[in-house]
Each structure stands twice: as C-alpha cells, then as structure tokens.
Image: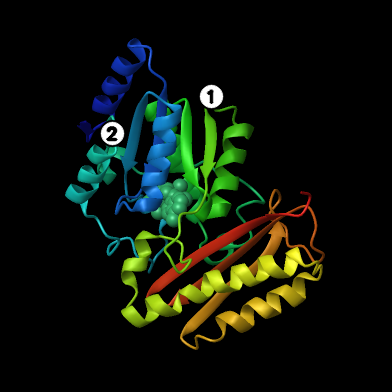
Amino acid sequence: MNVAKTIAEIRRCVRDARAAGKTVGLVPTMGALHVGHVSLIEAAAERCDFVVVSIFVNPTQFGPGEDFEKYPRPFEEDLAICAEHGVSAVFAPSPAEMYPQENLTWVGVEKLTAPLCGRSRPGHFRGVTTVCTKLFNIVGCDVAFFGQKDAQQAVVIRRMAADLNMPLEIVVCPTVREDDGLAVSSRNKYLSAEQRKDAAQIFQSLSRCREMIEVGEKDASAIRAEMCGILGRVPAMEIEYVSIVDAGTLEEIERIGGRVLVAVAVRLGTARLIDNILVDTTR
Ligand code: AMP
C-alpha cells in the first residue's frame, strides 16, 4: 500500500494505476477510521481497481470553537485498517500541503447548504465542497464514495459534481450502525459510558418516525413532536434540530410524501451527533 503525503506522490501513484488500465475510486475521510469508513472502502473495492483513501482533518470545514484540535488522529491505526482492507494508496497530506497559501478560491453550493447543519455551522459546507473539489482534482478519481450518515453532505456533493460537470460518479453508501442503532461515528469517542447509552435514543426517535410514516401518519409536526418526546427522555441531550425535509431539495415539508429525509442533530456532552433516515413513500 502506498502512503502519499504529498500531492505529487499521490498523482504519481494514480498515474501509474491509470497507465495499467485501472479505474480509480476515492474514499475521502478525516481518519479515525471505523466500520462505517470500511463499508465505503469495500464498496470502492467492488467498483474500482485502485482504491485511494484520503485522510485529512480539513481545517476549513471547522468553525471557531469546534473540535478541529481535539479531533482524533490515530494515524498508524488508520493505516493498518486501510492495509487490512486492501486499499491501494492512502493520501494523507498536511494542512500546509493542501493550503500552502491563504485560500482565496472557494466552491460553494447555494440553497442546499442553508438548512439543517448549515444553520448551526456557517462555512462548514463551503469547507467541505472546497476540499472535496481539491481532492477530486488531485486524485482524479472515476468514482467517489460518501456515507448516507452525512445526508446533507451527500446531497450537496452530488449537486456540486453535477453543476460543475465534474467527470466522476458520486456513490452514497448506507449508514453503518452499532447494535443499538447508534450511527457509528468518530465523534462517538467523545461520549462517556452513560452518554453512549443515552445516544441510542437518536435512532429510537428515527425508528419511531419510520413506524409512524409506515402506518400512514402524514402530519410532519405530529411526527416531529413524537421524536422530540423520545429525545427528551434524555435531559442532558440538547436538540439542535429534528427536521423532516424533501430528500432532494432539503426543504421542510408539512405533509409526508415523496422521498422524505428525516434528520436529527443533538449535542450530548461535548459531542455533536447527527443521524438520519430516508423514507421513500412512493414505493
Ligand atoms: P468522516 O471521516 O467522518 O468525514 O467521514 C468520511 C466518510 O465516511 C463520509 O462520507 C461519511 O458520511 C462516511 N461515514 C461516516 N460514518 C459513517 C457510517 N456510520 N456509515 C456510513 N458511512 C459513514
């Protein structure tokens, strides 16, 4: 497995792979790899001959006071996980390699970045879309793999790639969960044992929502109220949003119909946790 720390090195690896006729898949990550990331690596290995995993805690997508400094960086363990899962090359640049001078050029997606996480994390998606554009330009992949866990990110990246005619396919993989339903996340490490137990209520609330929709509830406010009640069982949990939106436009809906994205963001201790489900009522 190649471990490239510079743009020149990863370009060389990919150029050699292409010369050998290989298709290239990219899995962008911030490291602290877990089974969620592994599911993306496996999906990439199934589709592509040469799998690149990028590991970069991107400073431009963190706001002031967020967890950029304390974000876990277990680099050697991450390399072991990549090697174990047949990754062809890891791209792990430093911030200075990615941003050698003041960044004056940004990629921004309108509308889709305004609601949900965009509301409490101004500038976050601009950082994400800019770094993903840079990674796509650096690696030159045929396919890039993202997780449904970050539902808004997936919608935004897909739209960016389409609007800017980026010559690659975006694949979104299902959310991997713990046994009690909690979405696996690098940020779960911030939870105490008790908070970890309490965090299961997030999936409980989403599951209840799915049930309500399946038995025909059409009133989004009624569903939201029920979900807030379930989350409210954990007094320490601070609800940032419980939103029921159109899965394509991310606009809030009042009547359930079409493809519905139900998304939750909470704060529990120092952790900010997000999760979501997609419910397709057209099926
Ligand atoms: P991160 O390292 O948290 O930026 O995540 C890198 C990629 O892994 C993103 O596309 C995430 O959506 C995806 N991802 C993170 N957690 C999960 C999970 N539990 N299931 C599936 N994909 C995930």
Task: Tell me if the residue at label 1 has its CB under 8 Å from ligand 1.
Answer: no
Amino acid type shown at disc 1: Pro
Q: Is residue 236 visible?
A: yes
Q: Is residue 31 above or below residue 273?
A: above
Is 159 left, or right, of 214 in this rendering?
left
Q: Residue at (29%, 39%) from the top-left corner?
A: 85
Residue 161 lies in quadrant: top right
Instruction: Return the disc, 2 or 1, that comes first in the chain's sequence.
Output: 2
Could you classify mark 2 by the number of other residues whose Cα lies within 10 Å: few (under 14), some (14-19), or many (20 or more)? some
Quarter of the picture containing the N terminus is top left
Label for residue 86? Answer: 2
SS assignment at label 2: loop
Q: Identify which amino acid the numbered label 2 is placed on.
A: Gly
**Residue at position x 36%, y 15% from top?**
18
Q: Relative to residue 282, is residue 208 depicted above or below?
A: below
Instruction: Name the spot of residue 40 as percent of width and height, x first.
Output: 42, 42
Tally of marks: 2
Q: Which mark is residue 167?
A: 1
Residue 227 image offset from top left, x and y in percent: 64, 76
Secondary structure beneath dot 1 equals loop
Q: Is residue 100 visible?
A: no
> What's the residue at 34%, 50% (across, down)?
30
